[in-house]
Image: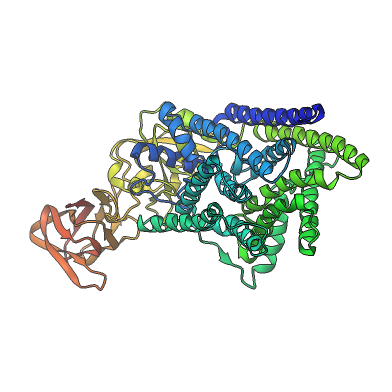
Amino acid sequence: MQSKRERLKIGFWWAMVAAQIVFLCLVALRAGGAVIDNDAAKVYTHMKAIWESGSLVVPDWRYITTMELDCTTLLALPFYGLTHNPILAFWCGNVVLLGLWAALLAFLVRRMGGSPARAGLAVLAVLLPYELCSVGYWNMLFLNASQYAFKVMLPLLLAALLLGPDRPRRRDWGLLVVYLAGVFLTGLSSGVYVAACGLAPVLCLAGWEWLHNRLTATPYRLVCAGGSVVATLAGMIIQSRLGIVTNATSMSFNTLSTLRDNAANCVIAFFRLFGLVPEEAVTVFSLAGISLLLRLVLVAGILFVCLRLTAWTLGGKLPEELRPARYLTAIFWWNLGVLLVTNTRYGDPYFEYRYHLMGAVPLLVMGAFALPVLVRRPVRLRRLSAVGGTAFLLALALLVNLDGVRDIWRPDGAIGDNGPERELCGIINTMDVEDVIVAAGSGTTEICAALDPTRRYITLQETESGSGELITWDGYYTDTDGLSYDQPAAVICQEEKGVDSLPAFLADQCTEVGRTSGYIVLRTDGAPLADGMAGLPYGQAGVDYPDSVYYTWTGTIDAERRLHTGEAGGEVLRSPRLQFHADTRITLSCESEGSGTIGTLQLLDSNGSLLAEAQVPAGEAQVTLDAPAGYGTLVLVLDPGTRAVVGPIRFDALN
């Protein structure tokens, strides 16, 4: 039976956990969409598309890093169905996620043999928002789309399952089903990453324990181990069979020229994860400086405990009650080894430090589990450490939470990072348009799309030819085709570049509506004529213009994107290597004077051989060719002495 002191200790730490969860929920709700970054905004848009399509695999969707299924997306989906508010849906999903974090960490610590008080201590240590930025601790684990939450949780759950009794109960089998479903989902969404960096060290250590007769190979544990491999491979195979291409496994080994800098930045990145490397100078004895000192003590403490446990393990002197903590240290060392030998400086100029989450969270749990054991003797040290440790953690929690609030509600009155985008959406909401073309960077596009789910936002990227190209980083491929933009639209450009930075065909049909925070908001008089997809690789219909991306031409382009040819004749227009996902009818518009025929429209295969050919009549003509599914190059050849005006090229699927 627990003593009164123990019950008070349990109640105190779990009251702190409850207060921390409430704090995180209230801050996220109060901040609303103020802290949505462009990475999270992509997931918001994707979640809406999943709901609207009724499928986890959205047709014609462009995936970037992962399929974005092993994050808060699935938790947010039902709430989006009820509210049709993506920001509120993800907030509700993260409330559920915080409960799952608390349940998992408590379950793990109890399986390791820790007390309920130590379980509460572990939960609190993990739930502190050590840093707020787009790829930082808070954002990756508890806020917005929480992209790394389930990735980090799965290895911890596996360790808890393997530490279970030799005779599992019905609850254990239920948790095993949940675990294997999660592994399959992360294999489908993120490929081999979680298995290689998080599950592998746990399974390897379990295999070592079995070889030394310290772990029994029960059917339950064999299913845990074998199921981890099978579920991961099954997810990856299904992703491949679905034809989905992501960059989830794009990490590469260091070369001689990158190894040194990568290794140095890897070590620094672990401290960056806890907000210990500020961008600006911080006075040591200010509140921010004291917060940094407390975080430094925490990080130094867990690293010291990790090193001590590792040394004891290698020397065969690890106390029996601390043996379960080896699973946590194994995850840390394994993940650190992977990060040291692979080049992860492709986005951040220093290091993609979010990758340290896989090892850092287990270290926090290990510290909460092991530290009370290490200071148990003598009694005076235990009492002193209990008082000092409690005061330290309370001060750390207070200052870290205060820092989090200050990162959102800033002294200059700004709230979060997307004030300019919220102002933009305020102006656009007064306009009678459904489409918004953003010539101010994809980050603006994605954040505005999350804040304003009632409209379609698309990025217009500059091209060498000056015609512009519609692109999407995480959206429907078909949204980049010009055919779907047949109504007036809003256009956003940067104030410093001005309207003249837009392609001429777009600038000529725009009128200014307003300005805000470095942006100019305009409205087109008619269809914006923008385009970004050549041929018909997706969808049932599409359109290209003579100056669409990768097209080459001879002549001049007018404000309606029509090609005016000269009298020299010959090849006046050539497409890129067009892709057709189905048999396709190609229709080219052409105007000329005279009578008879003025040239030919040719379709060539990949080897340059003629697949089809049609004569181009004089006058106002619609020239058609039927192309088989696959690839082809379209060429327009005119007779010498002929002047023509070449309009859009339309593509229609025949089946």
- Give the residue at the far left of this rendering: 596
Instruction: In this rendered view, identify the residue nearer to me: 648 or 214.
Output: 214
Instruction: In this rendered view, identify the residue nearer to me: 134 or 614.
Output: 134
The answer to whether residue 71 of the structure is visible from this angle is yes
Instruction: In this rendered view, identify the residue nearer to me: 510 or 223.
Output: 223
Q: Is residue 602 above or below residue 34?
A: below
From the image, which quarter does the N terminus lie in? top right
**Residue 305 position in % (x across, y down):** 79, 52
Q: Is residue 397 above or below residue 349?
A: above
Image quadrant in which you'd find residue 625: bottom left
At 54% from the left and 53% from the top, the residue drawn is 224
Instruction: In this rendered view, identify the residue nearer to me: 273 or 336.
Output: 336
Colour scheme of the picture: rainbow
Image quadrant in which you'd find residue 140: top right
Q: How many numbered circles does the render carry?
A: 0
At 28% from the left and 61% from the top, the residue drawn is 578
- Give the residue at the far front of this rendering: 167
**Residue 180 position in % (x across, y down):** 49, 49
Horizontal arrangement in the rendering, residue 505 relative to residue 46 (left or right): left
Q: Is residue 446 above or below residue 314?
A: above
Horizontal arrangement in the rendering, residue 296 relative to residue 177 (left or right): right
**Residue 382 position in % (x across, y down):** 88, 40
At 24% from the left and 56% from the top, the residue drawn is 564
**Residue 331 position in % (x across, y down):** 65, 55
Q: Is residue 405 above or below residue 612?
A: above
The answer to whether residue 66 of the structure is visible from this angle is no
Horizontal arrangement in the rendering, residue 392 relative to residue 40 (left or right): right
